[in-house]
Image (spheres, rainbow, N blue to C red):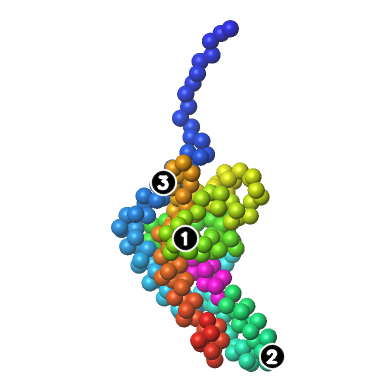
């Protein structure tokens, strides 16, 4: 039998590529100059949201003259029954959370891209960032941040409702290569994945999302009902 030469290859596996991406992102978002740019973008996005004259389309295109939060009428002028007023207030609370995240995070990311901190997210990333699960994930990771915890890859798979026994590689490849370079998530792999909120995600949540929720009226006559 002829000898078969063994040719070594330097091609990386998908797991190695993902690890390189998340390691590079984790180190990148530690740089003081990057963190300074993130803090400056906080003020720019807050101003944009408070002006409320623009919004973003589902594909991430800026729409001028279309406010991200529409003008609302006093609830008492819309409905008269108590239970209907409460339902309307609750739907407005939910809409405010959704719109604050969707339009705010896109402005934040586009602003950081304009500063050269990030690459502009393409339509695939825009969809990943704004799909319903992503704001819920950011919220959960912020809760872990407060408690000093993190999520594992199995936790992430469960969060995305992958069926028991599903290979965690699927959720790894769905989320980490896209969300970590944007700074929304941070991850480390050492005998398993350790996933936390990223520098961009934390700054947006604490310094943009929460203040806008607190100050935006959902009922013009009841500014205390946020």
Q: Nearer the viewer, mark 2 or mark 3?
A: 2
Whether residue 106 appears in this view of the structure is no
* Element at label 3: helix
Q: Earlier in the sequence, mark 1 or mark 2?
A: 2
Residue at the image point whose x is 55% and y is 73% from the top: 97
Residue at the image point whose x is 47% and y is 55% from the top: 150
Task: Give the residue pinned by disc 3.
Answer: 23
Q: Tell me how far mark 3 sits from mark 1, CA to CA.
A: 21 Å
* Element at label 1: helix
Task: Give the residue pinned by disc 2.
Answer: 81
- Give the magenta-colored segment's residue range: 95-107
The kind of secondary structure the magenta stretch mainly shows is helix
Task: Report if the CB atoms under discs 2 and 3 are less than 8 Å apart.
Answer: no
Image vertical order of residue 76 relative to residue 215, above or below: below
Residue at the image point whose x is 41% and y is 46% from the top: 23
Task: Give the residue pinned by disc 1.
Answer: 144
Q: Tell me how far mark 1 sits from mark 2, CA to CA.
A: 40 Å
Image vertical order of residue 70 relative to residue 176, above or below: below
Q: Earlier in the sequence, mark 2 or mark 3?
A: 3
């Amino acid at each position: 039998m002829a000898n078969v030469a063994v040719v070594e290859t330097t091609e990386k596996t998908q797991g190695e590529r993902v690890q390189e991406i998340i390691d590079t992102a984790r180190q990148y978002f530690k740089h003081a100059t990057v963190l300074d740019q993130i803090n400056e973008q906080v003020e720019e996005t807050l101003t944009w949201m408070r002006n409320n004259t623009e919004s973003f389309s589902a594909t991430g295109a800026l729409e001028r003259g279309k406010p991200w939060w529409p003008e609302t009428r006093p609830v008492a002028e819309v409905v008269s029954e108590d239970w209907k007023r409460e339902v309307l207030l609750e739907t407005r609370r939910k809409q405010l959370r959704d719109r604050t995240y969707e339009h705010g995070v896109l402005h934040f990311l586009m602003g950081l891209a304009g500063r050269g901190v990030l690459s502009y997210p393409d339509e695939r990333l825009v969809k990943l960032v704004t799909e319903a699960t992503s704001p819920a994930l950011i919220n959960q990771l912020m809760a872990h941040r407060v408690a000093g915890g993190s999520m594992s890859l199995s936790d992430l798979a469960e969060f995305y409702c992958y069926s028991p026994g599903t290979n965690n590689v699927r959720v790894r490849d769905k989320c980490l290569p896209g969300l970590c370079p944007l700074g929304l998530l941070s991850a480390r792999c050492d005998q398993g994945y350790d996933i936390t909120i990223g520098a961009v995600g934390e700054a947006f949540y604490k310094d943009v999302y929460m203040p806008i929720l607190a100050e935006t009226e959902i009922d013009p006559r009841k500014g205390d009902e946020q």
